[in-house]
Amino acid sequence: MEGPLCFPEGPDTQVPLPCLEFETAQLELDEGLGGGHDIVGIGARKGVPVDPDGDGIRRLVGTQRGEVRVPFRRLANNGDAARALFAASHQGYAVPKPALGDTTEWLVHPAQWDNHQGTPGFSSPKLAHIQFAAALAEARLPDRRPLLAAAESLLGFQEADGSWGVDTGGMPGAPATYGITLATYLARRTLEMADSTRFAPAIARANRWFQSATPENILDAAAMLLAMPRSEEIRSRCLEMVLNAQTSDGGWGPQVHMPAEDFDTAVVLLALSSVGESGRSSKALARGRAFLVSRQLPSGGWIETTRPSGQQSYAEHISTSGWALYALLMTDPKRQ
């Protein structure tokens, strides 16, 4: 039995949010993320903290017949989680407006992002702008001025070679660090969603970088496929590499023959979906989705992917959960 989707509150929180009325119940995910699996809802009556694991207040997202119920007020400390919930709302899940109200209000002021005092692990201004701009793009707000301002802010971080370089300490990208390839994909995607004509020069430079890049790991290869799914050159360079790296349990790790990780698996699922091939790719995609669903914790989130593996990180836990949810939403064959 899978658990509800859960995002814990940050360790820097000073005052816990009031619990909303949410009855404990078994919730059926009707043709949703888990392919018909039941979800055990973990909730609380009004005034009782939600703390199933004893490690802080839990922000719970329960799903019932196409609904996403979110008893929390903001996700400004993590753009990945907010992006996933925006995506859920666009796919027909009823995310209550208060759930993302404060987050949206904060995201529409990109000039304030440099003053962000969020979760440890998100201290890079470049990475913060890439992450929050991606969340703002996913919001698809009627007023496009904030998104244009966010896209403009990304231009100053683009390298001369067209990439958005992110320091990962020599390790493959992780949920809280992305890595150069995934960061470049997300930044370029924001520019495209904001105004592909206005930002055409920066987009072209990023495309040239992708065409000349060499994947150093599975995450790089997946991000390159995400960025250029119709490029025969990149498909020949990356698709077989990704398919051959699928583990016996259906997931993907950062390198061939390494154990599967939830974050790497999520990005690969998005890549395979973007490529859109049938046959071997579609079978790999189905196995990967089953792996990711099976990895959901009873509390609703996913175990953090860290570099090296097996470490504990709150920031990585939140982002891993956000990426896993986003991948399941965007690759669900019943919602394509």
Image (spheres, grey):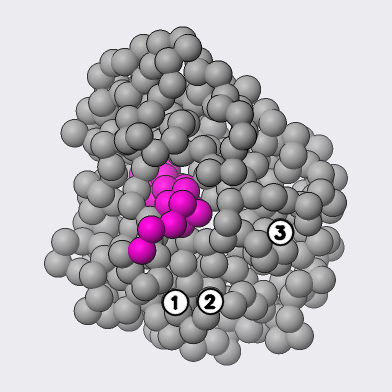
**For residue 94, side relative to residue 247 (left or right):** right
The residue that appears at 16% across and 61% down in the rendered structure is 249
User: Looking at the picture, does residue 15 appear above or below residue 76?
Assistant: above
Whether residue 241 appears in this view of the structure is yes
For the stretch drawn in magenta, the main secondary structure is helix
Give amino acid for label 1.
Answer: Pro
| Residue 153 percent coordinates (x, y) | 81, 61
Q: Mark 3 points at which residue?
A: 129
Label annotation for residue 204:
none
Mark 2 secondary-structure assignment: loop
- Which span of residues is magenta-colored? 311-332
User: Looking at the picture, does residue 101 appear above or below residue 197?
Assistant: above
Q: Mark 1 points at which residue?
A: 172
| Residue 192 percent coordinates (x, y) | 70, 60
The residue that appears at 51% across and 38% down in the rendered structure is 9
Mark 1 secondary-structure assignment: loop
Closest to the observer: 52 or 218? 52
- Distance from label 2 to label 3 (Cα)? 17 Å
User: Looking at the picture, does residue 71 appear above or below residue 283?
Assistant: above
Label annotation for residue 168:
2
**For residue 128, side relative to residue 251 (left or right):** right
Residue reaching furthest left?
248
- Distance from label 1 to label 2 (Cα)? 7 Å
193 is within the stretch colored magenta: no
User: Looking at the picture, does residue 5 appear above or below residue 170?
Assistant: above
Give amino acid for label 2.
Answer: Thr
Q: For the residue carrying disc 1, how many other residues have a C-alpha within 10 Å: few (<14), some (14-19), or many (20+)?
A: many
329 is within the stretch colored magenta: yes
Discs 1, 2 touching: Cβ within 8 Å: yes
The residue that appears at 65% across and 62% down in the rendered structure is 123
Give amino acid for label 3.
Answer: His
| Residue 331 percent coordinates (x, y) | 39, 49
